[in-house]
């Protein structure tokens, strides 16, 4: 990409309020998804979903398609206490600092829950993530 195109696309993104998307490795994505799960709504998704009578997300993720899961996180479930969580997820400091788009954040959360459902446990922070966060400049 030429310097002129880079400057123009960066300026255009800033004018419309969009952060430039950073690409994440699967390991980075898994770690980011874990942190989103731990931090959403201030206390994490597990505040509700790790206790009864609320659905266990590691079981729900086996039944829902990715599109269904993302729809619930974006729009909530009418008639239940599940509200739209995407706006709150986008306010998490790490999500902002990594310049994640909403799509990236929700995909990371989905990937993390799938990994947990498959028994893969906690993710370690990849060293490469710090450089991407620093490059984001937030």
Image: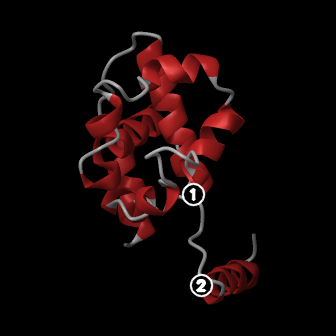
Sequence-wise, the earlier of marks 2 and 1 is: 2
Q: Is residue 62 above or below residue 111?
A: above
x and y percentages locating residue 91 in the rendered image: 39, 65
Callout in the foreground (2, 1): 1
Determine if residue 126 is in view.
no
**Left or right of 129 in this view: 44:** left
x and y percentages locating residue 92 in the rendered image: 35, 59
Q: Nearer the viewer, residue 49 or 10?
A: 49
Q: Is residue 82 above or below residue 118?
A: below
Cα separation between marks 2 and 1: 16 Å
- In the rendered structure, find residue 49 and report the number of the disc placed on it: none
x and y percentages locating residue 110 in the rendered image: 54, 34
Residue pictured at 65% horizontal, 45% vertical = 71
Residue carrying label 2: 14
Q: Nearer the viewer, residue 56 or 131?
A: 56
The secondary element bearing badge 2 is classed as helix
The secondary element bearing badge 1 is classed as helix
Asked if disc 2 and disc 1 are in contact, CB closer than 8 Å, the reply is no
Residue pictured at 64% horizontal, 87% vertical = 11
Determine if residue 55 is in view.
yes
Is the N terminus in the top left, top right, bottom left or bottom right quadrant? Answer: bottom right
Q: Is residue 55 above or below residue 108?
A: above
Residue carrying label 1: 102
Q: Local crowd at mark 2 within 10 Å, few (<14), some, or many (≥20)? A: few
**Left or right of 32 in this view: 42:** left
x and y percentages locating residue 120 in the rendered image: 39, 14
Residue pictured at 26% horizontal, 39% vertical = 47
Residue pictured at 38% horizontal, 47% vertical = 129
Q: Quadrant of residue 90?
A: bottom left
Q: Nearer the viewer, residue 54 or 26?
A: 54
Is the C terminus in the top left, top right, bottom left or bottom right quadrant? Answer: bottom left
């Amino acid at each position: 990409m030429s310097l002129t195109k880079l400057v123009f696309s960066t300026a255009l993104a800033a004018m419309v309020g969009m952060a430039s998307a950073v690409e994440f490795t699967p390991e980075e994505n898994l770690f980011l998804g874990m942190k989103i799960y731990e931090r959403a709504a201030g206390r994490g998704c597990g505040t509700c979903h790790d206790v009864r009578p609320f659905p266990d997300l590691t079981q729900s993720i086996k039944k829902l398609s990715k599109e269904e899961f993302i729809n619930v996180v974006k729009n909530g479930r009418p008639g239940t206490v599940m509200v739209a969580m995407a706006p709150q997820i986008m306010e998490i400091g790490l999500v902002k600092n990594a310049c994640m788009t909403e799509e990236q954040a929700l995909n990371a959360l989905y990937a993390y829950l799938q990994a947990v459902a498959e028994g893969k446990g906690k993710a370690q922070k990849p060293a490469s993530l710090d450089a991407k966060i620093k490059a984001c400049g937030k």
